[in-house]
Amino acid sequence: MRDVIVSVNGRPTPNLEELQAILENHCPGDRVKVGLLRGETRRVIVTVLQQPPE
C-alpha cells in the first residue's frame, strides 16, 4: 500500500505541481506537517526536509 500526500502544512496538494510549489518555499532542515492518505485512513506526520539527491 502506498501513501498519497494530500497536504503540506495544511495546504492541499491536489497535484505534483502544487506539491513542488509548496516545497520550493522551504529549505532542507525545515520541519513540515504532511497529510497522508494511506488506504482509507488519513494521517498527519511531521517530517524534516532533506536535500534532494544530485
Image (spheres, grey):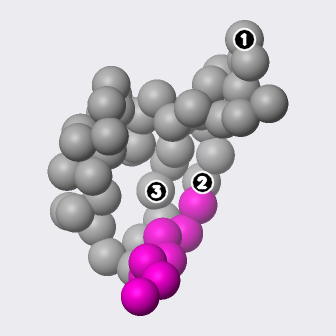
Q: Is residue 39 above or below residue 44?
A: above
Rendered-image quadrant of the C terminus:
bottom left
Left of 48 or right of it: where is 51?
left
Which residue corresponds to the image point at 66% horizontal and 35% vertical from the top-left? 3
Which residue corresponds to the image point at 27% horizontal and 52% vertical from the top-left? 20
Look at label 1 and name its amino acid: Glu
Look at label 3 and name its amino acid: Val
Left of 25 or right of it: where is 12?
right
Tell me, for residue 46, which label it has, or none.
2
Q: Is residue 32 above or below residue 4?
A: below
Left of 43 or right of it: where is 47?
left
- Disc 1 from disc 3: Cα separation: 22 Å
- Image position, residue 46 (x, y; %): 59, 54
- Disc 1 from disc 2: Cα separation: 20 Å
Most extreme residue toward the front, as rendered? 54
Look at label 2 and name its amino acid: Val
Task: Tell me which corner region of the image, top left, top right, bottom left or bottom right, holds residue 18.
Answer: top left
Would residue 29 be seen by someone viewing this image from the given angle? no
Q: Residues within 10 Å of mark 1 (few under 14, many from 20)?
A: few
Mark 3 or mark 2, earlier in chain: 3
Q: Residues within 10 Å of mark 3 (few under 14, many from 20)?
A: some
SS at mark 1 in the image = loop
Q: Which residues are magenta?
A: 47-54
Would residue 3 be seen by someone viewing this image from the given angle? yes
Q: Is residue 48 above or below residue 43?
A: below
Task: Tell me which corner region of the image, top left, top right, bottom left or bottom right, holds residue 52.
Answer: bottom left
Q: Magenta stretch containing residue 50, yes or no?
A: yes
Tell me, for residue 40, which label it has, or none.
1
Q: Which residue is mark 3?
A: 32
Which is more foreground, mark 1 or mark 2?
1
Q: Are marks 3 and 2 in contact (CB under 8 Å)?
A: yes
Mark 1 or mark 2, earlier in chain: 1
